[in-house]
Amino acid sequence: MKDPHVETLRYKLEVDQTYGRIENPPPLIHETEAYRMCLENDVLVIDMKEHHATIQSARNRVEPDLEAWQLDAALQREHMWLRFIYDEAGAVVKDLHIWPEGHNVATGSLVIGPIIVSGTGTCGPPVFQEYPQPPKRFRASEDVEAMFRRYERAVWRDETQLLSTGYACLSLMEGAAAVGSENSSRNKAVDKYNIHIDVFDALGTIVSTYGSLEEARKLHADAKREALSHDEKIWVRAAIRTLIRRKAEYDHDPREANSLPQIIMEDLPTLTTADSLKRVRKPRKHGNGHSKGGSSPSG
C-alpha cells in the first residue's frame, strides 16, 4: 500500500501596490527544519522536508509561518500589504523544484530594502528591490493579529482611535502577564516581556491624559484636552508597533522569552517637545527596571 507524501506546495504572492511595490527582486530562499522555500517572480514554491500524507497537513505546518511573514512585513509598512494565496494546482508529489543557484538563504532580517527613490516631483508608494525577509522569531497569534488590526484601523481609517488602540494593546499585555498573580500587572509585564517600566509608564500616561476632545481616551480632571503633536503621534505609533512585535516574539516561544533583548525608551523616537517630556512621568526605578508599586494602564 502506497504512503502518500506531499512534496511541494505553491502560493501566489499578492502585493497591495498602494503601500509599496516590489520591482525585479532576486529570488529569496529560506530554509527551516520542516521545509525549503523559494520566492521568485511572486510565486512561492515550498518543498517539504517533513512527511505529510495530506495537502491539508502540509498547509497546516507551513501557513502559520506565512501568516507571521505577512504580519511582520505589515508592521513595517503599517498595513497588510502582502498576502500569500494558496495555489490548489501547485501541489506536487515526488516532483522536486529546481532551486536557483547563487542566492543566499534568508536569515530572518527585519529590514525591507533597498528602496528606490524617484527623482521626480511626484509622490507615490515606495519601490523595493528585494522581497521582505521572513521573520526568524514571530508568531501571528490571535492576540497579535487583533492588536495589529486595531492599529491598522487607527492609522489609516480613524486616527482619533490611536490613544484607545494604545490603551488596548498596553492593557492586553499587562492583563496577560498578571493572570494568576496578585502582583502589579505592569511589573509582571516588565518581567514577562522584558520591556523597561519607563516604556509602559510613558505609554500609560499618554493614553490616559493626552489628546483633544475627539481623540482622548479619558476626559478626567487631569486630561490635557489638547491635540497630540506630530512628535507625540509618531511616538505613540512606534510604541504600539513595538508592543505588537514583542508580543509576537514572545508568543513564538514563551520558553525562550528570557533571551529577548530588553526594550528601553532609547529604542523609540524621542519626544522632543518640552511639554511632552514634562508630561511623561519619570518613575523611580529599582531591580530590573521596575517602578516602585507599578501602575495600571489607566494610571
Image (spheres, helix red, strand yellow):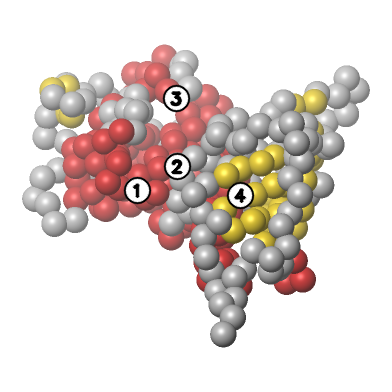
Quadrant of residue 103 in the image? top right
Whether tag 1 and tag 2 are in contact, CB under 8 A, the answer is yes
Amino acid type at image mark 3? Leu
Instruction: Identify the amino acid type marked 1.
Output: Asp
Quadrant showing the C terminus: top left
Q: How far apart are the two marked residues, 2 and 4, measured between alpha carbons?
A: 17 Å
Q: Is residue 167 above or below residue 2?
A: above
**Which comes before the other along the chain, label 1 or label 3?**
1
Distance of label 3 from label 2 (alpha carbons) = 20 Å
Find disc 3 in the rendering and name its residue: 268
Query: Which residue is the site of mark 4?
Result: 36
| Mark toward the viewer: 1 or 3 | 1
Position of residue 225 measured from the top left corner of the image (x, y, whole percent): 42, 36
Disc 4 is placed on an element classified as strand
**Left or right placement of residue 170 versus residue 153 in this view:** left
The answer to which of 215 and 288 lies nearer the viewer is 288
Q: Is residue 161 visible?
A: no
What residue is rendered at 49% in x and 40% in y? Answer: 136
